[in-house]
Amino acid sequence: MRHGPDIAPIAAIIGDPARAAMLVALMDGRALTAGELAHEAGVTPQTASGHLNKMTDAGLLVVRKQGRHRYVALAGDEVGQVLEALMGVAAATGHGRTRTGPKEPALRAARVCYDHLAGEQAVALLRGLIDQGAILDHGDTLELTDMGTARFAAFGIDLAILRKSRRPVCRACLDWSERRFHLGGSLGAAVLTQIYAKGWAKREDGSRVVTFTDQGMQAFSDAFGIN
Amino acid sequence: MRHGPDIAPIAAIIGDPARAAMLVALMDGRALTAGELAHEAGVTPQTASGHLNKMTDAGLLVVRKQGRHRYVALAGDEVGQVLEALMGVAAATGHGRTRTGPKEPALRAARVCYDHLAGEQAVALLRGLIDQGAILDHGDTLELTDMGTARFAAFGIDLAILRKSRRPVCRACLDWSERRFHLGGSLGAAVLTQIYAKGWAKREDGSRVVTFTDQGMQAFSDAFGIN
DNA sequence: GGAATGCTTCGGCCCAGACCGAAACTTTAG
DNA sequence: CTAAAGTTTCGGTCTGGGCCGAAGCATTCC
């Protein structure tokens, strides 16, 4: 502990099986109630309550009380990124039977990563945007071109609004199943929102899987120049 | 625990203060002996031995026995990336006094990240390489151009050798003090090696700080088109 | 109003695991 | 060969913390 922040307390919090299960359950970006998380982790509500207190105190979660429910969500996409990174190491170092990613093919194809799209489709999306010249990757951050801004405006996303937030608009997020980058940040979140709004895809209940309709997949590919 | 690898055991291992101290001490990329790590973590050798066994079993460390010493190093740059990511969250969520990065200005300017350069200088380096057209950022990975290959050859780095290893040559590594990307991978490591070899800079003992000489800084800036 | 639901606090049990002392083992030094 | 240094294994102690039962607040429903 010569310098830099102390990572042990944070890692210790993630290191408990019940808490890790809760965090993973929250990785789809939804806000869940304390009771749902207790069931998810396989512990009683009073045990879960203690865990949630610890995680909010540590700044990993944010809470919103609403009626008699307590809705909990990940505190930010930074937390989600750490969880994905840990999954990468856990998968790589996992005792022998190293599976490259999720078992279910559906999960590998398209899933939710915190609040944006991940998986094969997401990787293809970013690749298509770069090939089209809508996004430049300038080393430190992804950079949206004017052409890209216009394209997203046509897609129904107003970049001016996104830029007002402190959250980075474009962010390269490492996909632990594909081992490639996909589009994160507020723009990545907005794209997923639009995909839902247009009815191209919907989220499977109780899972991170995102299922595209046939027409949705076609429209998605056309819109972003995939293959 | 619906799907995906189990992150709790890995996080639990990092979550112990003594083990976290050892891992952080190893982040400068050197291989340290078991005794040195015991001292670093403030525990007795026999306690450290147990910790090292756990971490090697988990795949976080690699060991090389040499004489009566046991040299230990991080198992790969993936592990280093997780540690840096955890530092980012620990710094961001750390009780109020959020410092953006290392306190010491020297540490912020240039330091070692696993086995390559990090800090302001490293970020400037990658920026310069991209501006020069030596490296293209193609979304998923950084891509070295032919021009870049020639430039590095002139710098004394043989890319053909680097490409033989399974380790990625170019890798974008997120700098937790600068919050920007710098050059990692085997090429990043080779650059740092050459900087040492040319006498442009040297590592401070017992610290991650890298100190450039005046001429070294000048030569470094000239070589990579910084500012 | 009473009853049900969701969540929290309190108290106590219990176990994993971090720690060290002592001693053995291995390699280098003299 | 003896001595010393580095490391490991064994045995035992002890504390931190995860867990649940019971009870106590809120909020909503009837």
Image (cartoon, coloured by chain):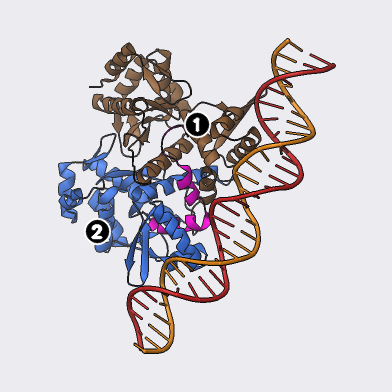
Chain colours: A brown, B blue, C red, D orange
Q: CA distance from mark 2 to mark 1?
A: 45 Å
Tell me which residue sits at (29%, 20%) in the image: A224
Q: Secondary structure at mark 1?
A: helix
Magenta segment, prevailing SS (helix, strand or loop): helix
Drawn side of residue B188 relative to residue B32, left or right: left
- Answer yes or no: is residue B227 visible: no
Residue B12 in the image: state x and y as whole percent: 50, 48
Label 1 lies in what chain? A
Work out whether B212 lies above or below C5: below
Q: The disc labelled 1 sits on which kind of residue? A: Ala
Nearest to the observer: residue B28 or residue A111: A111
Q: What range is drawn magenta here?
A: B1-28
On-image quarter of the C terminus of chain A: top left
Residue A101 in the image: state x and y as whole percent: 35, 35
Per the image, the residue denoted by label 1 is: A25
Q: Which mark is residue B194?
A: 2
Work out whether B53 lies above or below A78: below
